[in-house]
Image (spheres, rainbow, N blue to C red):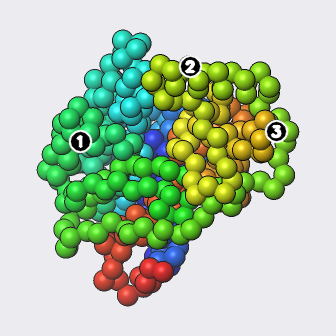
Amino acid sequence: MKKITSLDLFAGVGGMRISLSKAARRLGFYDQCKLYSEINEYSIQTYEANFTKTKLIKDIKSVKNSEISDKIPNHDILLAGFPCQPFSRAGVSNRKYLKRAHGFNDKDQGDLFFNILEILKIKKPKAFLLENVQHLENYSNGQVLDEILYNLRKYYYVPEPKILDAQDFGLAQRRRRIYIVGFLEKKNEFQYPEPNFKKVKVRDFLDKNFDKKYIISDKLWKSHQERKERNKKNGKGFGFKLTNPNEKCTRTISSRYYKDGSECLIFRGDTRNPRRLTPREVFRLQGFPESFKFPVSDLQAYRQAGNAVPINVVEKVCDSVINYLFKNKKNLKKVA
């Protein structure tokens, strides 16, 4: 098998790395991750429980442009799920409420794209794959995405980004994300993967047995119902979502799921309180394998799963990227 080398930036718990590795193996390659970056200590703990020892730079901002040549290893594919909170609807709303900057003006997270750009300019990998929230497409009337594409296209062939939904790729979760790919060399027009529309239901991702601690209390259940009624009267239209296991998908599970589980409460019958998803179920809804370890508290596990990428989708995008790069290689297997 031939080797593909990669960087895993803003790695979280390694969802993009898992996706690339699965795609590479199926196509006759193996992926060697040369470096990952992640600033959250709990995510680092989970990442290192699941992968062989890999060089870590916690804060990619700590690498000055003049240091990139020496500190960042050469690689074929750059992966980056750069922080989405400064561009998400909820994140922007929260920042406005707190009178904080958002978008590119958020100097903690919003401008991290430019660190990616500098690495691409200097290290010149063959390809990159970026992932972010759907709202990036329309944030600031599309001006931010236009600026991102303008800068990337100075150095790379970058087709129009694509919004893909996890529920169209065999996961029982409605999760729409924007994907941006680029190639140092343009061979022909890049094609994003087509959805497979595999039919699944929420129950396919649920544990047969679960700890009773995930059943919400009478007090919390009453609070959910009262808040939903208040919001309905005020025309807000937002409250808890009761999900029947026979439904096709859940709402998007976010990193705030740990707070009260309102995005997805599993229906257990008219006379019984619903329950939250377990952390394993949330990771499962993101496509993570059963072997994936999360040696952290439930609170941190919910955050990590909610911030992760949907494996099924990213894996298929990686299929397309590898095919585009190496499709003339004799050892490249046909994608199933």
Q: What element carries label 1?
A: helix
Q: What element carries label 2?
A: helix
Residue 151: percent from left, percent from top: 17, 44
Mark 3 = which residue? 271
Give the left or right position of residue 203, taking residue 314 as reference: right
Identify the amino acid type marked 3. Thr
Give the left or right position of residue 262, taking residue 295 as reference: left
Q: Nearer the viewer, residue 69 or 249?
A: 249
Q: Do the residues labelled 2 and 1 touch (CB within 8 Å)?
A: no
Q: Residue at x 53, y 69 (%)?
A: 198
Mark 2 = which residue? 230
Q: On screen, 206 above or below 266?
A: below
Q: What element carries label 3?
A: loop
Residue 291: percent from left, percent from top: 71, 58
Q: Which residue is drawn at 20% across and 35% down?
A: 141
Residue 244 in sight in this render: yes
Q: Residue furthest front?
A: 233
Q: Which of marks 2 and 3 is nearer the N terminus?
A: 2
Q: Residues within 10 Å of mark 2 (few under 14, many from 20)?
A: some
| Quarter-of-image position of residue 77 | bottom left
Q: Nearer the viewer, mark 1 or mark 3?
A: 3
Q: On screen, 211 above or below 52?
A: above
